[in-house]
Amino acid sequence: MKKYKNNKSPHGGKGTSVRAKKHLGQHFLKDENTARKIAKTLSFSGYEKVLEIGPGMGVLTKYLLQENVETHVIEIDVESVAYLEENYPKLSGRIHQQDFLKYNLSEIFGKEEFAITGNFPYNISTQIVFKMLDLRMQIPEFSGMFQKEVAKRICESPGTKTYGILSVLVQAFYETEYLFTVPPSVFDPPPKVESGVLRLKRKNTLKLNCDEKLFFRIVKTAFNQRRKTLRNSLKSFNLPENLREDTIFGKRPEQLGYQEFIELTQKIQPYAVSNQ
């Protein structure tokens, strides 16, 4: 990728711009208005700390720093970290050069609640969501930019082709809202697809009324063979014939909302324990 004209950062910072690295899935947001809108997707209410994933050159970061919260950023790219350290003195001690997917966030937040936001690298965005779900007891709010297709899938309703594993698992714990679409032209380099910004707000029910590990396993197994009825896609659970005659097993996974998957888990749970 070519550097910006005169090798200066497009965001008014000192020094040269950071080179976008394909292997890190970097597409730097260069539009101030879009960055401002993403920052405003969080309510900044009910928690005191925010974590931004993949800040790059800080176009979103500077708007988070204007809010009354303690902003932390986590960035794997050495070049971006150096740029942030030079241009954002307010972040001193809160720039974490780590791989978000591998890092133990309790090193930063302990057991405190915090929000997550960011312009997420498309190549790891789904994994970011799964880690967020693992940490859901600490994350009351989550927002950010994904590939549009992924953002739409997370917020999708039952009965559609795009409704899937992410839809069910996220909606079981969070209220989902697709906010707006972002064109490729606001990035450098521009991606080949549109982007979408979403917001997730955790529900008051922090735990499901079923075995949650089994719930996750059933959802993933069912959608791995989404064209089949549950009677066929869940054969690996070795369920008794009388249970498999239940009408719910005649449905396909995309026909079930998260609440119905909870009910399905409750039906399977007594047998799954004996089959372990």
Image (spheres, helix red, strand yellow):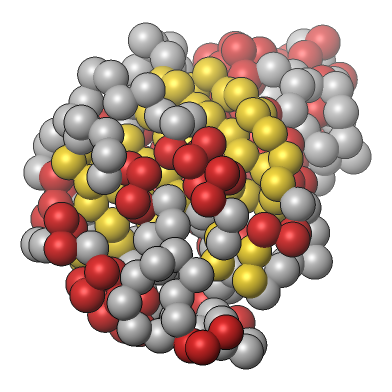
| Residue beneath the point at 51% across and 88% down | 6
In the image, residue 161 above or below residue 245: below
Q: Quadrant of the C terminus?
A: top left
Residue 229 makes an appearance in the image = yes
| Residue beneath the point at 60% across and 12% down | 259
In the image, residue 230 above or below residue 7: above
Q: Is residue 244 left or right of residue 61?
A: right
Which residue is outermost to the front?
A: 6
Q: Is residue 216 left or right of residue 147?
A: left
* Nearer to me, 118 or 127: 118
Residue 23 makes an appearance in the image = no
Residue 213, horizontal then vertical, whole percent? 44, 35
Residue 59, horizontal then vertical, whole percent? 44, 57
* Nearer to me, 249 or 102: 102
In the image, residue 32 above or below residue 112: below
Q: How many marks?
A: 0
Residue 192, horizontal then vertical, whole percent? 80, 66
Quadrant of residue 116 within the rendered picture: top left
| Residue beneath the point at 14% across and 45% down | 109
Q: Quadrant of the N terminus?
A: bottom right
In the image, residue 151 above or below residue 174: below
Quadrant of residue 158 within the rendered picture: top right
* Nearer to me, 87 or 69: 87
| Residue beneath the point at 14% across and 34% down | 112
